[in-house]
Structures are given as structure tokens and as C-alpha cells.
């Protein structure tokens, strides 16, 4: 039995014939800010939206906060140097963001600052693709790499583990031995249970990021401020509150 948990560029997914992940058109820069005197966020998550940019501050405690910046323009050719990345955010990409944002990220622990091109797999590849073959399957980002806009990538992977464990458990005999003749059907049941759940959240996450930072025209503002924030976001959040059942 082989369970591919080897990430976005999974060799197991490639062996199964799944489509390669594609660039979403967005880049993400993130880090951990440590403010010795406190950051003053008072437990409230902050988000800033500008034309083709979106930033956020997520307090972890009174002195530490996770921050991110998602943008359509990748950082200049400065490699992976965290100091240069941080300066690029403060001096260029986020220069018009509120002073609170710039002040907090200025206290970043440089060892945590990184950037990445945001990749995802087309949802229809998960719906129509081969997710299991010959006692081999995939889980986590190997199956459903997605944009981070709903914060559900890791959650989906945990759901995969529970559902997969439950189905594999049904192939264990009373004597505690794995009955190989039943593994194939167990993996098929796992895939059947996870396919549409994963594809739905992949779609919702991509659309969430697109509508929040893909333009400033009047219709995009209407779509974002009226349709998405007042109606669709609630649906997306409800979809994330999912009970995948017990392990056994």
C-alpha cells in the first residue's frame, strides 16, 4: 500500500496521471512578527485590500502575529533573502497599507519570512482524475493543492487522514492483519468520499481570493463588497465547518 503525501509536486500524483498544479496568478509573502511591547491587535484579525493586493494580520498572542501579503505582482528578482523580501513589502508592495500593518511586520523574525508562487490543481482534475490505482492513492496537497484564501489546505489533509484511516481500518482482520484483497475497495471508498469535498473547497478558495483582490472596477467592488462579503463568504465559512466522522 502506498499513500502519496509528498506535497504539491507529488510524484505519486504524477504516476496516477493527475494534472500538474498550475500557477494561480498570485504570489504570497508571509512571516511571524514579534513585538516585545505588544502589537495592540487585541485578538482581532485584520485584513487590508488594495488593487490586486491583500494583506492580513492574525494575532497569535499579545506579542506575536502572523502576517501575509498576497499580490498579483511577484517580488522583484531578489531571491529568497528574507531581509530584502521584507524591505520589498514595506517599501513597495504594501507601502499604501495602514501604518499599523507596516509597523507590525517591521518586527518580523527574519527566519520566518518567505515567499512562494501560489499553486493549485484544477478542481475538475480531482473530480474526473484517477485518485487511486493498484493499492496506491494520494492525500493532502498531493491530491488537492489549493490556494490559501480559506485557510483549509491543512484542514483538508487532516480530514483525509481520518477518512483514509477509517476505510483502511475496515480492511484489518479480527486478528489485526491487513487483508490485502480488501485494500483496493477501501481506497476506492476513501476517494469516493473525498473527491467532491476537496474539489468544492478548492473552487471556493480560489474564487475567494480572486474576488477579493482581482480588480477595482465598479462591478468587482460590487461583487466583492455586496455579493461576496454579505452572502457568499458565509456559505464558504459554513463549508469549512465539516464533520468528517470518527476515525473508527
Image (cartoon, grey):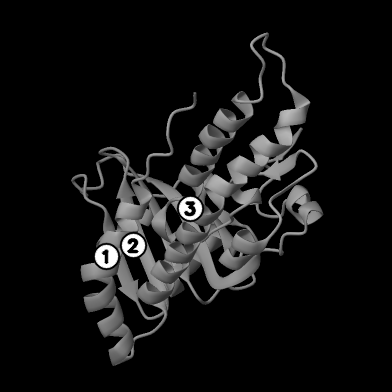
Q: Position of residue 79 (x, y in %)?
A: 66, 63
Q: Is residue 51 above or below residue 3?
A: below
Q: Which residue is mark 3?
A: 197
Measured Cα–Cα span from mark 2 to mark 3 = 37 Å
Q: Count the labels in the image.
A: 3
State which quadrant residue 175 falls in: top right
Categorize mark 2 by other alpha carbons within 10 Å: few (<14), some (14-19), many (20+): some
Q: Position of residue 125 (x, y in %)?
A: 64, 64
Q: Position of residue 70 (x, y in %)?
A: 45, 66
Categorize mark 3 by other alpha carbons within 10 Å: few (<14), some (14-19), many (20+): some
Nearest-to-viewer mark from 2 and 3: 3
Who is closer to the viewer here, 194 or 48?
Answer: 194
Is 207 left, or right, of 81 in this rendering?
A: left
Residue at (76% x, 38% y) in the render: 135
Query: Mark 1–mark 3 contact, CB under 8 Å?
Result: no
Q: Which residue is mark 2?
A: 102
Q: Earlier in the sequence, mark 2 or mark 3?
A: 2
Measured Cα–Cα span from mark 1 to mark 3 = 40 Å
Query: Would residue 139 be seen by someone viewing this image from the given angle?
Result: no
Q: Which residue is mark 1?
A: 99
State which quadrant residue 24 falls in: bottom right
Query: Mark 1–mark 2 contact, CB under 8 Å?
Result: yes
Q: Quadrant of the N terminus?
A: top right
Q: Is residue 154 above or below residue 205?
A: above
Residue at (41% x, 73% y) in the render: 53
Categorize mark 1 by other alpha carbons within 10 Å: few (<14), some (14-19), many (20+): few
Residue at (73% x, 52% y) in the render: 13
Who is closer to the viewer here, 33 or 73?
Answer: 73
Who is closer to the viewer here, 161 or 30?
Answer: 161
Amino acid at each position: 500500500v502506498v499513500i502519496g503525501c509528498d506535497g504539491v509536486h507529488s510524484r505519486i500524483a504524477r504516476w496516477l496521471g493527475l494534472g500538474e498544479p498550475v500557477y494561480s496568478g498570485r504570489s504570497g509573502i508571509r512571516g511571524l512578527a514579534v513585538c516585545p511591547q505588544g502589537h495592540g491587535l487585541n485578538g482581532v484579525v485584520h485584513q487590508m485590500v488594495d488593487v490586486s493586493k491583500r494583506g492580513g494580520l492574525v494575532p497569535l498572542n499579545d506579542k506575536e502575529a502572523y502576517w501575509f501579503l498576497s499580490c498579483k505582482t511577484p517580488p522583484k528578482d531578489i531571491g529568497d533573502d528574507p531581509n530584502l523580501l521584507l524591505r520589498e513589502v514595506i517599501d513597495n508592495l504594501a507601502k499604501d497599507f495602514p501604518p499599523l500593518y507596516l509597523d507590525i511586520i517591521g518586527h518580523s523574525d527574519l527566519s520566518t519570512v518567505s515567499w512562494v508562487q501560489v499553486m493549485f490543481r484544477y478542481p475538475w482534475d480531482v473530480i474526473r482524475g484517477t485518485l487511486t490505482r493498484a493499492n496506491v492513492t494520494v492525500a493532502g496537497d498531493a491530491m488537492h493543492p489549493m490556494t490559501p484564501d480559506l485557510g483549509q489546505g491543512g484542514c483538508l489533509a487532516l480530514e483525509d487522514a481520518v477518512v483514509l484511516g477509517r476505510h483502511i481500518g475496515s480492511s484489518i482482520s479480527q486478528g489485526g492483519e491487513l487483508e490485502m484483497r480488501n485494500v483496493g475497495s477501501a481506497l476506492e471508498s476513501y476517494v469516493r468520499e473525498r473527491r467532491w469535498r476537496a474539489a468544492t473547497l478548492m473552487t471556493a478558495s480560489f474564487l475567494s481570493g480572486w474576488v477579493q483582490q482581482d480588480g477595482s472596477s465598479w462591478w468587482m467592488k460590487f461583487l466583492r463588497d455586496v455579493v461576496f462579503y454579505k452572502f457568499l463568504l458565509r456559505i464558504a465559512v459554513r463549508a469549512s465547518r465539516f464533520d468528517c466522522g470518527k476515525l473508527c
